[in-house]
Amino acid sequence: GAGVSQSPRYKVAKRGQDVALRCDPISGHVSLFWYQQALGQGPEFLTYFQNEAQLDKSGLPSDRFFAERPEGSVSTLKIQRTQQEDSAVYLCASSFGQGPEAFFGQGTRLTVV
Amino acid sequence: AQKITQTQPGMFVQEKEAVTLDCTYDTSDPSYGLFWYKQPSSGEMIFLIYQGSYDQQNATEGRYSLNFQKARKSANLVISASQLGDSAMYFCAMREGEDNQGGKLIFGQGTELSVKP
């Protein structure tokens, strides 16, 4: 595809349920980022991949959050035992790894009830 | 300490007029990049403009320009000739380190711009 694709666009989860959010970056993009955006706030960094290597996961809020990119393209962000405070929009971004610009997907809006 | 500060939660501008959205930043890294993104109600983050810390001239992209004042650590976005479609949230962001290091973006809280007809 032409842009970064995220699925699903919307997800409602019951508290305690596990969820998996998918990101399809732009083909050939080396770098992939996940961000969490709470309502009315700016995005906050969660984790960063360069190809299949997870180089920075300092932003993951707890050990319930896990991300992978096994083949260096598609990435999945998994949240185990969801809690209400996990409700947010999860944004994925990709870039070539050189040069400034990162391209964002439309995000997945997660609502935990 | 907050690294990116956007002090204007909301701004109004008349269509066809210019508007300035404020952004100040804090870093001790000599190499950094400054970004502005637009986020319409659809949710995606749209890249608008970039300024590198070593760039001598202010960045411009069409109706967007970045007023970079390094000594004051400010990177204000100027939108000229506002259009109704400019109504959106605008985020200032910073990346520390060189461009090829693929570093994370640190975002401000955003400014909601409303363009009046």
Image (tube, rainbow, N blue to C red):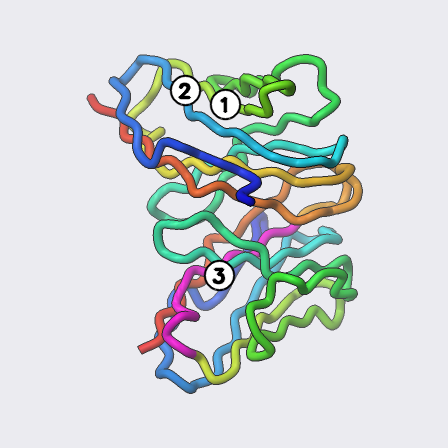
Image depth: mark 2 or mark 3 in front: 2
State which quadrant residue B11 falls in: top left
Q: Quadrant of residue B40?
A: top left
Which residue does the numbered mark 2 point to in the structure image?
A: B20
Give the percent coordinates (x, y) of residue A35.
Answer: 54, 57
Q: Chain of mark 2?
A: B
Seen in the picture, residue A33 relative to B83 is either above or below; the reply is: below
Type of amino acid under label 2: Thr
- Disc 1: which chain? B
Q: Dot 1: few (<14), some (14–19), or many (≥20) neighbours within 10 Å?
A: some
Left or right: A53, with B64 as reference point: right
**What residue is at 52 percent from the left and 31 percent from the top?**
B48
Residue A87 among magenta residues:
yes
Q: Is residue B59 visible?
A: no
Q: Which residues are magenta?
A: A83-94
Q: Residue at x 32, y 22 (%)?
A: B83
Q: Three-letter amino acid code at disc 1? A: Asn
Above-or-below relation of B63 to B43: above
Q: Is circle 2 on the same chain as circle 3?
A: no
Local packing at callout 2 (Cα closer than 10 Å; few below 14, some 14-19, many 20+) is: some
Find out whether the residues at labels 2 and 3 contact each other: C-beta distance under 8 Å: no
Residues tagged 2 and 1 counted as in contact (Cβ below 8 A): yes
| Residue at image location 64% in from the left, 67% down from the top | A75
Q: What residue did someone put label 1 on?
A: B76
Q: Which residue is mark 3?
A: A90
